[in-house]
Image (tube, helix red, strand yellow):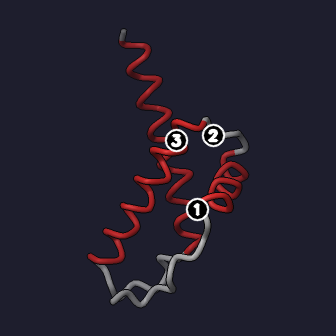
Amino acid sequence: MSKSPPITITSEELRNRAEASLGARIPGDLWDQAEKLARHKLDLYRQRQPGTTYYDNEYLVLLTADTVREAAFSLLTIARAM
């Protein structure tokens, strides 16, 4: 059991806060992938390090914004390679 507080942020609030953090709108298809992956990553982090206390909603917002950046960079790299 994780010592971090439960994740209670809704998808809509998460998207709004991630977009505010990025300063840009996140396209729908990219959002769907990024949100799913970020929530999965956070679940794994919480399982692997149950003593950590800061894996909370705010951490998920930051993780989601990073995941969007990573995915966008990967898509750009693939597009330029073709």
Name the amino acid type tagged 1.
Val
Give the structural element (helix, strand or loop) at label 3.
Answer: helix
Q: Position of residue 43 (x, y in %)?
A: 36, 70
Q: Which mark is residue 49?
A: none
Residue at horizontal 46 percent and vertical 85 percent from the top: 4
Q: Which mark is residue 61?
A: 1
Name the amino acid type tagged 2.
Ile
The residue beneath circle 3 is 69
Q: CA distance from mark 1 to mark 2?
A: 13 Å
Q: Position of residue 24 (x, y in %)?
A: 71, 40
Q: Examine the image and state in which quarter residue 40 appears.
A: bottom left
Residue at horizontal 40 percent and vertical 84 percent from the top: 52
Packing grade of label 3 (10 A; few <14, some 14-19, many >=20) is: some
Vertical position of residue 30 compared to residue 80: above or below: below
Which of label 1 and label 2 is nearer to you?
2
Q: Examine the image and state in which quarter residue 13 appears.
A: bottom right
Say which label, 3 or 1, has the lower sequence index. 1
Q: CA distance from mark 2 to mark 3?
A: 10 Å
Do the residues under discs 1 and 2 have CB atoms within 8 angstroms? no
Q: CA distance from mark 3 to mark 1?
A: 13 Å
Vertical position of residue 30 compared to residue 47: above or below: above
Say which label, 1 or 2, has the lower sequence index. 2
Name the amino acid type tagged 3.
Arg
Give the structural element (helix, strand or loop) at label 2.
Answer: loop
Which of label 2 and label 3 is nearer to you?
2
Q: Position of residue 12 (x, y in %)?
A: 66, 58
Vertical position of residue 54 compared to residue 77: above or below: below
Say which label, 2 or 3, has the lower sequence index. 2
The residue beneath circle 2 is 26
Q: Position of residue 8 (x, y in %)?
A: 57, 76
